[in-house]
Image (cartoon, rainbow, N blue to C red):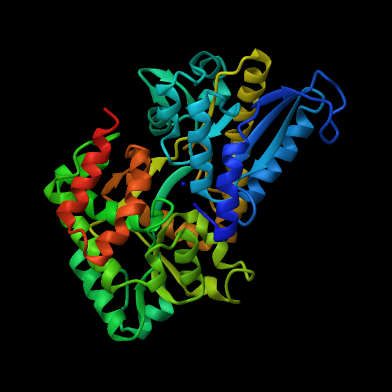
Amino acid sequence: MKKKWISLLLTGLMAVSLLAGCGKSGDKSSTDGDTSSDDVVVINYPTFQCGVNTAAPVVAQLVEEFNEEYKGQYKIVLEEVPGDANYVDKIKVQLGTGDLPPVVYGGGYNLLDLALANDLVVDLTEVVNADSEWKGLYSDAALEANSRDGKIYASSVEGSVIGYFYNKDLFAEAGIEEPAKSWDEFFEQCDKLKAAGITPLAMDTADSAWVTQLWWGAMVATANEDGLKFMETMNPDDYNTPEMIASVEKIQKMLQEYTTTDAVGGKYENAANNFLSGQVAMIANGPWMIGDFSDTDKTSEGFADKVGSAIYPDSFVYDAPIQGYFVTKQSDPKVEEAAIAMVKFFTSEHAQELGLESQGMVPAASSVEVSKAATEKYPLLAEFLDQTAEATVRSDNMQATMYSNLLDVVSQELPRLHSGELDAEAFCQVLTDAAAKNE
């Protein structure tokens, strides 16, 4: 779901503010900005899509447009929560108090099921079905991702089509002509890069280890039919499988031999910066990163021309809508009504087109076409989508399907895997034990 730079000091301060900031989620207010009437319903909306996050400009524009369209009726007030992990922690704290913000973005962290378990989510089935335009934006996959027991609880704005990117210059320097077709070839290429003095992979362990989990899940999905079945299972509870253990052995090797020293303990920001600065040859991530390649504040002039895209070895690509926005139960029905209007606006055709053309984000709705303007602005996006059409194996990503408490466990235990304190079997047992705590 996608992560940006934040200092350790800020993280510490944020942790304190999370505990102190669980106030009233929705309110009628006349004190903020241009709100001039007590009848204006304020939607307090915390988000990690702020600051230097790639989605921040899109969210800011949607907030501005929503507040203009509903001026005098509703108003969104953003609460910036830099860092995905800080955001997830904040929502978990508020789950404990039962005082969630009116709108929560699931963002690939399976927050919907946590809120449903506490009976804090508004059923959107009736309102979505009554709106043919809104309902038409739900593909079969998006409907499945956002529904439980036949009821619609959330709405997606973006798809999650994820492969990896590589530095063509570094590949050429190591004598590599094209991305690997098999995992054996992939590891041979890592050895070639290493022999040429080039660090092969961007990886991370903190904040749920987004990049590392992408490499990991792709190996599980392509191991065999059982591996793919595991990747397609929501909230799996047994990680002691041959496919999982074998993939963890490879992740251990990758952490020990093929990545940067700051990967262990590092966040997505570290992995992204290492790729954008040309320090590593490959990074696993989605097309929302494409805009960064031509951002001269983040990388050098002409860097975008050096980047190629690829699906994973054995013809695999992640392909599933990201769990979307959901409305939480509030004491004031007017706040719930305002929140529903916000979710509809933020997942509209316009919002999906805006994300596509501003960020390179793949729309959740199959009816929203990838425009000529988007492919002209982001030719790498067109290249990647052509490649994904050839993929024969697809699944959701591991982070989106595992129990949410395992996100922290993965981050805690990967450094021990790297050091050798844990072997693959012990690592998988720790995950299995942590999953059992949800039963």
Q: Residue at x 83, y 19 (%)?
A: 38
Q: Residue at x 51, y 48 (%)?
A: 84
Q: Is residue 410 above or below residue 166?
A: above
Q: Picture quarter containing residue 414?
A: bottom left
Q: Position of residue 3 (x, y in %)?
A: 51, 54
Residue at 48% over, 55% down: 287
In-image side of 39 versus 412 (left or right): right
Tell me if residue 283 comes above or below residue 334 in the rendering: below
Q: Nearer the viewer, residue 330 or 107?
A: 330
Q: Is residue 152 above or below residue 93?
A: above
> Residue 216 falls in which quadrant of the image?
bottom left
Q: Residue 421, how many percent across, how many down?
A: 22, 62
Q: Is residue 417 left or right of residue 33?
A: left
Residue 404 at x, y percent in the picture: 37, 38
Residue at position x 63%, y 36% from top?
21
Residue 403 appearing in the image: yes
**Quarter of the view holding residue 185:** bottom left
Q: Residue furthest left?
A: 242
Where's the C terminus, which quadrant? top left
